[in-house]
Amino acid sequence: MFKIKSVLRSDEKDMVSEFESKIMVRGSEELNDHLAPNALASVFRAIGEKKQLDLLYETLSSHEPESRIIEPVGVYHESGKWYIFGYCHLRSDYRQFRTDRIHKIQLTALSFSKSHGQLESYLQPNSGEKTKIRILVDKDIVRYIKSDRKNYGFVSEKHTADGCEMTFLCRDPRDMFGRWFMMFADYATILEPDWLNDTILGYMNQARERIKKRPQG
């Protein structure tokens, strides 16, 4: 807890002691202080009162921040980033939200729709089924994705004559990994699972249709 308190404001440090089980630090990376304004205060108040939060959140695929209603479970730090972990009503599943992508956070009057377990139980390495993913990335692009890949279940890499082969174990291959892969899809190939290629093609077709329907200036 000392490492966490060292990057928090004085008014947030008191809350950490009260909600210690709701905060985790995973890995040995240095903590940063990039937390959304009043993020901890809002999260812990929501947990204490069992009220939903309204996040104005910027996803990888969105051009503008979108509203996400969540039921927060806790906060954790991993790979140099802070995350709020909670139940997302849009996805009807548990998701993590990077705090540096939160533009606004607001407590609502809506009560939790379900009960939630401890943060640690959701973040255990063996919790939830994982999918093995292998991709081949052009060597010139590897350095641009090296830091982010840890957030998507990166396991290992192998350099070949064709590029850098990376292996991942991911709990959310279709949405979370698939949309991240779209950021550099023109420089990479999915080796397995084959069905993930169909997912990527689906995203590309959706993007193509949206471009066709764009307002003409």
Image (cartoon, rainbow, N blue to C red):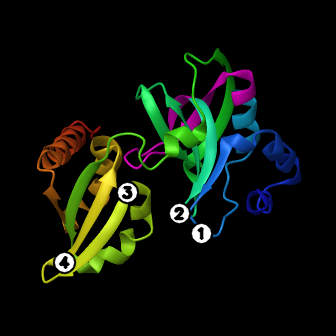
Q: Quadrant of residue 211?
A: top left
Question: Is any atom of residue 166 visible in this view?
Answer: yes
Disc with the residue nearer the chain's start (2 vs 3): 2
Asked if the residues shown at circle 2 and circle 3 are in contact, with their CB atoms under 8 angstroms apart, the answer is: no
**Residue type highlighted by circle 1:** Glu
Q: Which mark is residue 153?
A: 3
Disc with the residue nearer the chain's start (2 vs 1): 1
**Residue type highlighted by circle 4:** Gly
Crowding near the residue tagged with mark 3, few <14, some 14–19, many ≥20 C-alpha atoms within 10 Å: many
Q: Is residue 112 left or right of residue 4?
A: left
Q: Which mark is residue 29?
A: 1
> Element at badge 4?
strand
**Residue type highlighted by circle 2:** Ser
Q: Quadrant of residue 134?
A: bottom left
**Magenta residues, start to end:** 47-70
> Element at badge 2?
loop
Crowding near the residue tagged with mark 4, few <14, some 14–19, many ≥20 C-alpha atoms within 10 Å: some
> Element at badge 1?
loop
Asked if the residues shown at circle 2 and circle 1 are in contact, with their CB atoms under 8 angstroms apart, the answer is: yes
Crowding near the residue tagged with mark 2, few <14, some 14–19, many ≥20 C-alpha atoms within 10 Å: some
Kindly identify which residue carries mark 2.
79
- Toward the front, the furthest residue is 126
